[in-house]
Amino acid sequence: MAAEASHSASAASGSNRAGWFWLGCAVISLGVLLHVPMLVEAHAMGNRLVGMPVDTPMLAGMAMIAVGAIMACWGALPGRVAVRDQHDMVLFAVRDGTPLNRWHATAMAVLAVGLIIDVMKPATLGFVLPGLAKEYGIERSTAALLPLVALTGTAVGSIVWGWIADAYGRRVSILLSAILFAATSICGAMPSFGWNLLMCFLMGSSAGGMLPVVYTLLAEIIPPRHRSWVLVLVGGTGLVGGYLAASGAAHLLEPGYGWRSLWLQGFPTGLALLVLARFIPESPAFLLAQGRSNDLSRLADRFGFEQVERIAMPQVDSGQAGNRGFEAALVVTALSWSFVNFGLLLWLPMDLQARGYSSGLVSGVLASSALLALPTTALAAWCYSRLSSKWTLIGTVVLTMIGLVGALLPTELLVWRPLLIGVVTILIVGTNGTIAVLLPYTAESFAVGVRGRATGVVAGCSKFGGIAVQVAAIAKLFPTLGGAALALLAPTILGIVMLGLAGRETRTGAHG
């Protein structure tokens, strides 16, 4: 048992500093627990902390969390082992004929859970804002600062964590996200709005960082013939599951424990992910660079890795002149998706009610449309793996474009409920399908040495629309549904054209 625990600790950090890692996690946990007395006191007063003085245990807890986070990060990070030059390193790939086994299935399940936990963070914002604004007594435009800083954090985290994944390893960067999930859960214990802004920026950074790294790791451990559908299905399940988990937590916790409980759940979920991290493998290139030959041999046996001279897929290195058009196409597609998802769909309920629809009808229409999200993800996974990765992505963006055109229809036509449901369904199906395909497609397309950063940049661009929307909300600018749809048609069509011209086919045997 002691040997097993020692091996687990060593595997968690990937270095000889495992003791610092686990000690840091323990210090973080104690720091979070020191906030409990104040939360218990607040629960007796209707779960209100606003105006309460910060007591000594809470100050000590915040200091311990900061120190513990530094210790845990130091223990998790090995020496810098950047893997950049594809021509000067030994390459490994999973054998094409390798069947999916229990190691693949376990890693897929754990990474899907990680994505669900990750997506819960930004998805919880919508459920937190009403209670937060009421407790702090702030206007809607001021409350919009919270999602602004949180989404800014996700954009920054996507880029920074992508760099960490390329410099230190995929698994290490996931561990760092889990550490910050637990540490920043005290966002729910902050008595002032300003402290909430700071903690939610850090929380957003960790949430934005995990998403591209999970896709990057999946692209490297799944056999080629299964890779396409696994990436899309795991990613889509994580995205939809995260939103369902956020709404379920709000339904169960918020009535009795207030909006703060939705942030505090980051502590147990972060610790759970740290426990499950032992089932997350590291990329073989980093095990080789760290001299961990035994771990590399064990990984090869479990996942079917073998040494190869080159990668068969048309993978590219970021920044080369011939690839800039492809990179630009991905960036434009991510930006246009972010504006539709965080702009038009965010304003959709408000605009429909302004057109005269009741709130009950609007929520019913949105619920009916959203039910199609999960089966659409499965269909996108099938098309992506069996037909064409490039044209599946283009097809989802075309669906979004059709939905935008439908949103331009006059109110007298959209008053017919089946037509309204059809338009909204196409928009939701198109946007869900696009993001479910875009990041796996990016991860598959780039070489291992730059894969984390490339996927991180595209993921960061997919958050930019949310930042712009919150800036508009702060300025009290809320465009109509038709106005937003008209403005977004041009970048959406541009993304379709650029993908058609510069997109690459990652599915073997298909034609781009």
Image (spheres, rainbow, N blue to C red):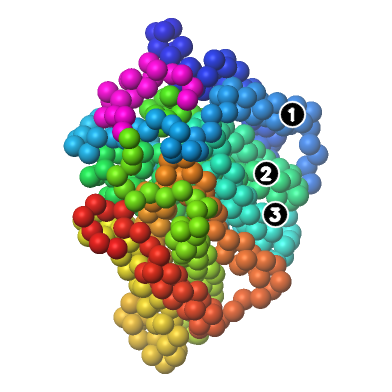
Q: Taken as a whole, is the magenta stretch helix, strand or loop?
A: helix
Quarter of the figure with the N terminus: top left
Report the residue marked by disc 3.
Answer: 135
Question: Which callout, 3 or 2, points at the residue further toward the start of the chain?
Answer: 3
Q: Nearer the viewer, residue 500 or 230?
A: 500
Q: Residue 265: horizontal and vertical position, in percent?
A: 54, 39
**Which sits earlier in the primary sequence, circle 3 or circle 1?**
1
The amino acid beneath tag 1 is Ala
**Residue at image point 33% right, 24% down:** 299
Q: Identify the residue position indicated by label 2 in the image.
A: 199
- Residues in magenta, as a range: 289-308
Q: Amino acid at mark 3?
A: Glu
For residue 404, side relative to residue 463 (left or right): left
- For residue 132: magenta? no
Asked whether, in this view, residue 1 is left or right of residue 246, the answer is left
Which class describes the residues within 10 Å of circle 3: few (<14), some (14-19), or many (20+)? Answer: some
Q: In this rendering, is residue 295 above or below 252?
A: above
Alpha carbon separation for disc pair 1 and 2: 14 Å
